[in-house]
Structures are given as structure tokens and as C-alpha cells.
Image: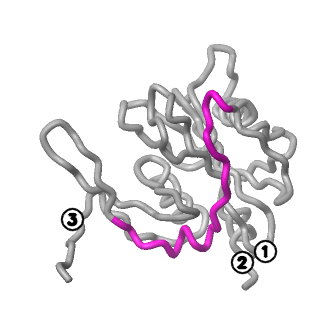
Amino acid sequence: MDNRFLTQKLQQSLRFSKRIYPAQAAVLIAITDEQDPKVLLTRRSAYMNNHAGEVSFPGGKRDPNDTSNIVVALREAQEETALNPFDVRLLGDLPMQKARNGMLVKPVVGLIPPEVQLVAQPSEIDRIFFASLQKLMDAPPIPYEVRYAHQSLYFPSMRVENEIVWGLTARMLVSLFQYGLDYKKDWPFLVNSPVFKIR
């Protein structure tokens, strides 16, 4: 199926905010410009201090000399995946999101060539992979257990490419679907614990 209309819709719908607030961090949502567009995702190194082993977009904290949210997103994407900033056709940004630690993160969206060559920065990234944009839109919210000191909470997650996408990254994807593709995905804050049937 030709899903190229998805990238056309993104180009028509997305713009950069007129009122720009410098975010504390920024990520790049890079989407391949092809018939079945795919989203660039990474799995963070198990040795990272924050969000170790979690699926995320390339991105990170603002440096003092970063001049804009776009610069943060492109610089971090290049540092983590060797993505050439000149290979990114910027489309716009999405509303600010708040991470679990309270940090304000700005998602920046762009198109990249499907054959782009990427290399994971081993101290930060364990895996670079691509997930079909259509499959992410269609993926049902599956309960993902997060254990805290005294209880477990279940957050909605998407299962793609043998990875679990949840939390901030999943919320940013839902925001992308809403603002870029006019598609409202059902995404509760918490979900009920899975029911295990006894055979």
C-alpha cells in the first residue's frame, strides 16, 4: 500500500510555532520520505543514567551555545546517530512535552532520505531502528508495567520491531498523529493491568 500521502499530509499540516520558547531539551522525529514512511527510533544504552534501555527519539539537553530548539535536535541527532543535519528537511514542531523528571522537551519533525547511513554512538545508543508510521498509528495500546517502590502502574505502550515504545516517546508519537496527520489515537494516561487467563 502506498502511504506516501502520510508524508504529504505532514508537510501540509506541520509548521514551526510563531512563539518560540527555548526548551530544556529537544528531540528529532525523523521520518523517511518514501512510500511506506518509517520513523527513526533508538534504544538508549543500558548504561545511561536516565531512561536506560528505553526507546526514544534522537535528542537531548540544550547546551549553553545552542541557539534554538532546532539546533538542539539536529546536533543531538548527529551526535547519537551520525545523521547529517543537511539530510533533514524540517517540517515543523509539536507542542512541548514534560518528561518524568519535569524537563520540558520540544519535538522537532523532519523528513530524511530512506537510504540514509546512520551509526549508533555506542556510549549512548544500543540500537537504531525504523518503525512503520502506519503500524505505529495502528498499534493498540498494550499495558506496560512500571514498578515503583510500593506499587506497579501500567502505562499504554506500542510494540513495534521487537521494542516497547511508551512514556514520553509514545506521547510524542500520539501528538504527531494528532497535529501532523489529523488522527486522534486513543491513548489513556494509565491502563488497567492485563488480565491473565487461566487455560
At label 1, which amino acid type do we have? Gln
Question: Mark 2 or mark 3, which has the lower sequence index?
Answer: 2
Question: Mark 2 or mark 1, which has the lower sequence index?
Answer: 2
Residue 101 in view (yes/no): yes
Residue 17 in view (yes/no): no
Question: What label does residue 3 carry, if any?
Answer: 2
Question: Mark 3 or mark 1, which has the lower sequence index?
Answer: 1
Task: Bin the neighbour count of mark 3 within 10 Å (Cα to Cα): few under 14, some 14-19, many 20 and up.
Answer: few
Q: Residue at x 62, y 51 (%)?
A: 41
Residue 190: image location, x then y, percent: 26, 58
Q: Residue at x 31, y 63 (%)?
A: 143
Instruction: Quote the CA–CA distance across marks 3 and 1.
Output: 36 Å
Question: What label does residue 35 carry, if any?
Answer: 1
Task: Give 141 or 62, whichever is nearer the viewer.
Answer: 141
Task: Give 129 or 189, whichever is nearer the viewer.
Answer: 129
Instruction: Quote the CA–CA distance across marks 2 and 1.
Output: 5 Å
At label 3, which amino acid type do we have? Asn
Give the magenta part as a residue range. Answer: 122-142
